[in-house]
Image (cartoon, rainbow, N blue to C red):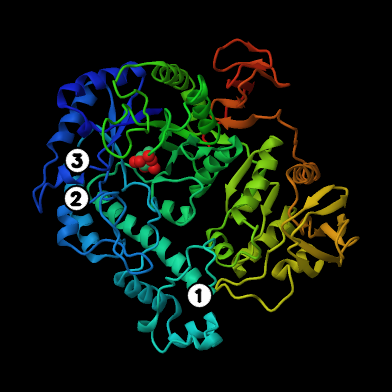
């Protein structure tokens, strides 16, 4: 399997390259990703191309058995290009973005597109037949540094074009957008504005905001713009080579749809920094990020940048504890990674990222982190056949919708509501109960339970699909703020839960954003504090009721039989422990074996071409016991249930060989 490092030979004197390659080999690294920020070296001045430094680096690395993933350098254009051409983004006040910090260009600038096509073409032509180039990465982290949205004139024109293609006539657009409100009717597509005021800052406190239809379409358009920009590069590369193409996405990042961005890629890769200068993430949050990336294409992925040391820009982050790099690696593998590339090999002596540590420190001397990864790499290569083409065994699906991310940002319902947090709360409850949980969309039939929290924008097609799933015996879990908007971000003229009312067997008579916590009791006990739907059951059975506020005694959580399946409706947010109890109850009724993982432990069951196994990850810095024993696939001996601090175990489940999963 790919076990590599992100490498910047241009940061080091050539005399060091050979030694660095030898060290990589010693560390067990067999792949590097290179080139993604070296535009200035590739094209010193207009039309003067020179790939010689990279040729040499690829060659030296190859001597040590190290292959290359090549990044196109378009995230960091050189100064001569931005001096000459019009390609910098504009912020919402029309100010040009400064140059010097990468990702400053506009996906719709004809000049940026033209320069991009030229450099990518030169690069692809040059490396077309190089046997050491095994894959391509397009650009670097689209959307990073808040670069998804641009407010320049090119974007305005392209947006108008995009809308014309979608709506056909301006009358149609006006009708769908409700432009009669505040005299917002447009006479022509040329009049369309960009939602520059407040649209991307829901927390700014600024009360000004745009037509929600305009705002949502602009977010879709911005996401599409990068998908299209990426596609141009992919098309060029594919003219020259059949090497697979990827892009390094960003886990939970949601300004660009990961479904759309990954549809043209051969495989997804992503960048994982669980604990950096901005703080550490809960292990469940990282695990959900992996699943989100796996769910983008519903396929295994590669981690293209995995944290390998203390990570920070202006200040340093916490130093990963002994065993933690290995633990993060196994977490990635457990959730679908088939390759690991660590950022970066040796820590930079200069530039923005002097404090973003790599496998080696500034002095390039191998120490603890190097040896820990060396050991991890050895283990992974032994486990190769258990890793490649393995699948997590999913029972549940959390449906993530980018349309809903954006629409909920635009109209947040109440100050404390967060769609992202709600999805995470459901994911966390499931993974803490050892329920294999995908984060994706569609193909509902593969799962016993489908969670669609706050699924507010629902298209007719989606509704038909989800109905069919439940009719055929599936379990659907809906929550408050669901089913009331159409794809144009208009509210439907029906009561909450809108298009889901019939399936849920309820009516919502009123709702409340309570400002203080409201007790909930019945089969599930806990408290709500963000939202309370006051439910009138029609055919549904009541699971829990409110015990507070003027709606005390009214239903809060219900379940309804529908076809051969059933629909749960959770009318309020619930504290973590109540939500966990609810998920336990739902899982049980759907035939899922849900069991508490000890605190700080993740247990993931997988199926591979070599047989089934269970991965156990201990995120505690203390020894932790689990009630699983068996043959260890890592050490070979018997696992006695005791995990060392930050320890990992993989237990073989049974000797069963299956052919091919994909
Ligand atoms: C990533 C990026 C890398 C590097 C790293 C550490 O987001 O792709 O190029 O900047 O963060 O800051």
Q: Residues at badges 1 and 3 in contact (C-beta under 8 Å)? A: no
Q: In x, y percent, where is residue 633?
A: 56, 18
Marks 2 and 1, how far apart at CA: 36 Å
Note whether 404 is above or below 67 in the view shown. Answer: below
Residue at image location 54% in from the left, 73% down from the top = 212
Q: In x, y percent, where is residue 566?
A: 78, 55
- Quadrant assignment, res 498: bottom right
Q: Residues at badges 2 and 1 in contact (C-beta under 8 Å)? A: no
Q: Which residue is mark 2?
A: 78
- Looking at the rendered structure, the secondary structure element under dot 1 is loop
Most extreme residue toward the right, as rendered? 553
Q: Which residue is mark 3?
A: 127
- Looking at the rendered structure, the secondary structure element under dot 2 is loop
Who comes first in sequence, dot 1 or dot 3? Answer: 3
Q: Which residue is mark 1?
A: 210
Marks 3 and 2, how far apart at CA: 21 Å
Note whether 406 is above or below 58 in the view shown. Answer: below
Circle 3 packing at 10 Å, graded few (<14), some (14-19), many (20+), is: some
């Amino acid at each position: 399997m790919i076990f590599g490092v992100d490498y910047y030979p241009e940061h080091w004197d050539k005399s060091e390259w050979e030694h660095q390659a030898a060290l990589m080999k010693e560390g067990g690294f067999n792949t590097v990703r290179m080139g993604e920020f070296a535009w200035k070296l590739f094209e010193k001045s207009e039309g003067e191309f020179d790939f010689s430094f990279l040729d040499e680096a690829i060659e030296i690395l190859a001597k040590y058995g190290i292959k290359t993933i090549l990044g196109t350098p378009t995230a960091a254009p050189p100064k001569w290009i931005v001096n000459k051409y019009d390609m910098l983004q504009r912020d919402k006040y029309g100010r040009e973005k400064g140059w010097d910090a990468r990702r400053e260009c506009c996906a719709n600038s004809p000049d940026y597109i033209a320069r991009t096509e030229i450099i990518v073409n030169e690069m692809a032509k040059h490396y077309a037949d190089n046997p050491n180039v095994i894959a391509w990465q397009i650009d670097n982290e689209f959307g990073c540094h808040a670069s998804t949205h641009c407010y320049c004139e090119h974007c305005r024109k392209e947006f108008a074009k995009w809308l014309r293609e979608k709506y056909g006539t301006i009358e149609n657009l006006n009708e769908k957008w409700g432009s009669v409100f505040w005299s917002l009717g447009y006479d022509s597509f040329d009049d369309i504005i960009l939602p520059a005021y407040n649209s991307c800052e829901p927390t700014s406190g600024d009360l000004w905001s745009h037509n929600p239809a305009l705002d949502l379409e602009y977010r879709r358009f911005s996401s599409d713009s990068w998908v299209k920009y990426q596609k141009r590069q992919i098309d060029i590369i594919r003219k020259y080579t059949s090497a697979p193409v990827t892009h390094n996405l960003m886990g939970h990042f949601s300004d660009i749809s990961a479904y759309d961005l990954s549809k043209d890629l051969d495989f997804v890769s992503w960048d994982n920094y669980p604990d950096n200068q901005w703080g550490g993430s809960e292990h469940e949050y990282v695990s959900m990020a992996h699943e989100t990336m796996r769910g983008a294409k519903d396929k295994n992925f590669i981690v293209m940048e995995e944290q390998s040391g203390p990570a920070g820009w202006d200040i340093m982050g916490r130093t990963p504890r002994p065993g933690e790099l290995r633990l993060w690696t196994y977490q990635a593998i457990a959730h679908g990674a088939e390759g690991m590339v660590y950022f970066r090999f040796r820590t930079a002596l200069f530039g923005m990222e002097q404090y973003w540590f790599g496998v080696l420190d500034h002095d390039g001397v191998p120490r603890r982190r190097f040896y820990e990864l060396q050991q991890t790499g050895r283990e992974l290569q032994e486990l190769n056949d258990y890793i490649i083409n393995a699948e997590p065994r999913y029972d549940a699906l959390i449906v993530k919708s980018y349309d809903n991310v954006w629409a909920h940002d635009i109209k947040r319902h109440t100050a404390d509501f967060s769609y992202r947090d709600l999805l995470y709360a459901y994911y966390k409850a499931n993974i803490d109960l050892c329920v294999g949980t995908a984060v994706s969309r569609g193909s509902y039939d593969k799962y016993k339970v489908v969670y669609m929290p706050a699924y507010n924008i629902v298209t007719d097609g989606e509704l038909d699909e989800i109905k069919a799933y439940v009719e055929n015996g599936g379990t659907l879990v809906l929550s408050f703020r669901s089913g009331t908007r159409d794809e144009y971000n208009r509210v439907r003229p029906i009561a909450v839960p809108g298009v889901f009312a019939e399936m849920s067997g309820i009516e919502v008579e009123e709702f409340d954003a309570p400002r203080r916590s409201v007790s909930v009791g019945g089969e599930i006990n806990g408290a709500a504090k963000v939202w309370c739907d006051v439910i009138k059951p029609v055919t549904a059975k009541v699971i829990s009721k409110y015990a507070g506020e003027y709606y005390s005694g009214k239903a809060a959580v219900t379940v309804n039989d529908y076809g051969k399946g059933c629909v749960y409706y959770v009318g309020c947010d619930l504290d973590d422990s109540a939500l966990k109890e609810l998920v336990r109850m739902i899982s049980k009724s759907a035939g899922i074996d849900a069991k508490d993982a000890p605190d700080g432990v993740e247990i993931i069951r997988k199926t591979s071409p070599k047989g089934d196994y269970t991965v156990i990850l201990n995120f505690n810095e203390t020894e932790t016991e689990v009630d699983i024993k068996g043959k260890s696939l890592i050490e070979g001996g018997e696992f006695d249930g005791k995990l060392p601090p930050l320890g990992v175990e993989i237990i073989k489940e049974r000797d069963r060989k299956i052919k091919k999963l994909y």
